[in-house]
């Protein structure tokens, strides 16, 4: 796939999924072949609040998906959290704009769904402070929606960072 970045600053959603999550997305770009844009392969950033095993808690996830559509079926890949996909689909000079759109999507979802608790975790282990900055920015947006940090830690066994945001009463 030859890829053309074409950031759409319009948020789409929220959309309810079969597993109970709500998703907000925006387009990052399209498949391009022979200088023709084929919109049958769309690269999107998906931001979602998904159910957990606790009824009062939702998990915040965000990642890249490839979507295709034919006459009868819409296919969306699983969320891709990898650095490799971020490098491939988001040019360095647009990273801040994409992060701001992720934050807008987070605020939209949190305002609409208003769960008692929100959890968030890193995909990679032992991230340096620079790599955690985006999580701090997203966390600040959650706090601005009426939440406080109930817990935040790095698991010493696997190096994954975790956040728990609790709704202020």
Image (tube, rainbow, N blue to C red):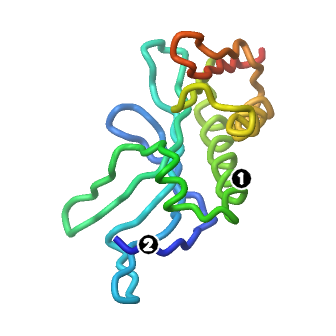
Query: Left or right: where does residue 145 sit relative to residue 79?
Result: right
Foreground of the two, 36 or 130: 130
Foreground of the two, 48 or 169: 48
Where residue 137 appears, as percent x and y from the top left, is 76, 39
Residue beneath the point at 54% across and 57% down: 87
**Splitting the image into 4 quarters, where does residue 156 fall?**
top right
Where residue 44 appears, as percent x and y from the top left, is 47, 58
Residue 5, above or below 51:
below
Which residue occupies the extreme bottom position in the image?
A: 35
Cα distance between the residues tagged 2 and 1? 22 Å
The label on residue 100 is: 1
Residue 113, above or below 39:
above
Which residue corresponds to mark 2? Answer: 3
Quadrant where the C terminus sits is: top right
Residue beneath the point at 48% across and 39% down: 22
Query: Left or right: where does residue 135 sit relative to residue 75?
Result: right
**Splitting the image into 4 quarters, where does residue 18 fall?**
top left
Which residue occupies the extreme left position in the image?
A: 72
The label on residue 141 is: none
Judge depth for marks 2 and 1 and give the one in front.
2
Residue 56, above or below 142:
above
Quadrant where the N terminus sits is: bottom left
Q: Earlier in the sequence, mark 2 or mark 1?
A: 2
Residue beneath the point at 43% across and 72% down: 3
Where residue 114 appears, as percent x and y from the top left, is 63, 28
Q: Decide: few, some or many residues near mark 1? Use Cα within 10 Å; few <14, some 14-19, many ≥20.
A: some
Let me know if residue 8 appears in the view: yes
Query: Left or right: where does residue 22 sit relative to residue 150?
Result: left
Q: Secondary structure at mark 2?
A: strand
Residue 76, above or below 72:
above
């Amino acid at each position: 796939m030859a890829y053309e970045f074409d950031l759409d600053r319009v948020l789409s959603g929220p959309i309810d999924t079969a597993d109970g999550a709500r998703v907000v997305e925006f387009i990052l770009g399209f498949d391009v072949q022979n200088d023709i844009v084929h919109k049958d392969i769309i690269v999107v950033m998906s931001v979602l609040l998904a159910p957990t095993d606790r009824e009062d808690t939702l998990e915040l996830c965000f990642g890249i998906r490839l979507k295709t559509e034919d006459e009868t079926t819409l296919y969306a890949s699983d969320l891709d959290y990898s650095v490799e996909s971020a490098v491939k689909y988001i040019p360095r000079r647009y990273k801040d704009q994409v992060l701001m759109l992720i934050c807008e999507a987070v605020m939209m979802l949190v305002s609409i769904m208003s769960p008692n608790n929100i959890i968030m975790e890193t995909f990679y282990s032992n991230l340096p402070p620079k790599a955690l900055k985006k999580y701090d920015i997203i966390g600040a947006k959650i706090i601005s929606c009426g939440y406080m940090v109930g817990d935040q830690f790095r698991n010493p066994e696997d190096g994954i960072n975790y956040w728990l945001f609790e709704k202020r009463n």
